[in-house]
Image (cartoon, rainbow, N blue to C red):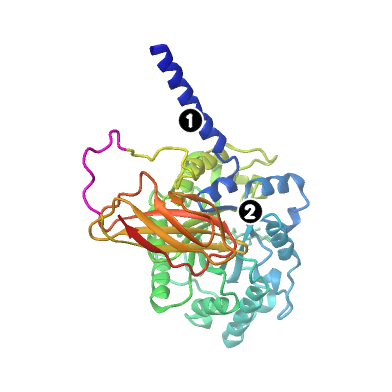
Amino acid sequence: MSVVLSAVGFAACMSMIMATSATAATTLGASAAEKGRYFGAAVAANKLSDSVYTTILNREFNSVTPENEMKIDATEPQQNQFTYTNADRIVSHARSRGMQVRGHTLAWHSQQPGWMQNMSGTALRNAMLNHVTQVATHFRGQVVAWDVVNEAFADGSSGARRDSNLQRTGNDWIEAAFRAARAADSGAKLCYNDYNTDDWTHAKTQAVYRMVQDFKQRGVPIDCVGLQSHFNSGSPYPGNYRTTLSSFAALGVDVQITELDIEGASATTYRNVVNDCLAVSRCNGITVWGIRDSDSWRASQTPLLFDNSGNKKPAYDAALSALNSGNPPTNPPTTPPTNPPTNPPTTPPPGGPGSCSATVSLNSWTGGFVATVRVTAGSSGTNSWTVTLTLPSGATVSNAWNAQRSGNSGTVQWTNVSYNGHIAAGQSTEFGFQGTGSAAGMTPTCTAT
Ligand code: G2I
């Protein structure tokens, strides 16, 4: 009898192992997509003819940021003469392979063409706004998120704006740039992007936080904050990084890790960064600033996930396994919830049936989207819940996590799975789904039982 039981136990165990290994994603992009996120790389147009480079790019990443090709000196080398050849090459390489594109960057004190460096006052303000308008219009519908303004705050303890010709046109230059970008491309997420804003206690981080808070309060159109996260011995990964991510997210913006590289490529630090992003539902993606170490602006620091020959480094394995073991689980969940009850409760949990509410946040790109639905219990909590959502015509759900669904288009009912039906009073849980088409404008209703 014990032999039979062991055999059954062994078979059950093996099938769990096989189920897990059969479904674990094997690339960064695929794994991130299962978590409703992207994993991207900065790409240089002149490397698209290098087959080692493009093999890794095409296999591993589902988001691309042009490293230099969308900057002001590249796109407007002479005033009012716009050149998009190299940027368009990257965009077309990415989008033809289903990768999304982050635009970088519309307004910046650096990499200005000579004509702009020599400008000031109203002429510069108007030239900057014209640049934002023209470039955002050219890439409308192709770029998921824009770094509208880059690196506008000073380093050190002042918390002040960085002095620059743009800053000298008036303190409102940043919000003017965001308004121009929104007017030109209402579909792109508009981000403020900076470095040395990773440590929550730093004056620069706090200053950017206050600006974003002010923009949200006054209705300036901002959707996201980019943390460049160039970590090295002088500016190391801080232990409070997750607090920084979640604090920005709590302002009602997405958070994106936009230019990640880590001196020495510590596997532990890469794992920590991935885990921190996965722990914050509005952290919607990570971009590494280059593919191989030799592609890095800091090549001698060997800060990336692939070595000079294109081999995966230990940091790659750490990042992938952190992505694969992160939340939310894929659909259907292949691993049990982290804290399943060891024995079924003998009496129903307190609370419920009560009321609940639901909100949807969307991460959209041309032809697709990821929706995150937050279910919040009313004052008596829930034992189970159902959310009803009507997708616009043409939108289809391709996969989902943390909820069961009744169909994949039109009006879809989502019900809790075993481990997230019980929500204590005032608390929340999240489920998500990925699909094709456009899911804009969905209004969820929630019923608690
Ligand atoms: O400096 C690292 C990054 C910091 N945040 C903003 C990013 O846009 C910035 O990227 C780097 C690129 O990785 C470099 O590739 O920006 C640098 C310029 O600020 C880029 O370097 C420039 C060189 O300075 C130029 O001499 C060169 O012509 O790259 C150009 C294209 O290869």
Residue range of the region highlighted in magenta in the rendering:
341-352
Q: Position of residue 252 (x, y in %)?
A: 41, 66
**Picture residue at 40% right of the left edge, 54% below the top:** 430
Which is more foreground, mark 1 or mark 2?
1
**Picture residue at 53% right of the left edge, 48% below the top:** 34
User: Sequence-wise, which precedes: disc 1 or disc 2?
Assistant: 1
- 41 or 335, nearer to the observer: 335
Query: Type of residue at label 2?
Result: Trp
Check mark 2 vs ligand 1: CB closer than 8 Å? yes or no.
Answer: yes
Q: Is residue 46 rendered to the left or right of residue 161?
A: right
Ligand 1 found in image quarter: bottom right
* Marker disc for residue 180: none
Inspect the magenta stretch and tell me whether residue 345 lies in it.
Answer: yes
> Which residue, given by chain and number where applicable, does mark 1 sit on?
16
Q: Residues within 10 Å of mark 2 (few under 14, many from 20)?
A: some
**Picture residue at 72% right of the left edge, 61% below the top:** 92
Q: Is residue 415 rendered to the left or right of residue 332?
A: left
* Marker disc for residue 297: 2
Give the quadrant of the C terminus.
Answer: bottom left
Inspect the magenta stretch and tell me whether residue 287 lies in it.
Answer: no
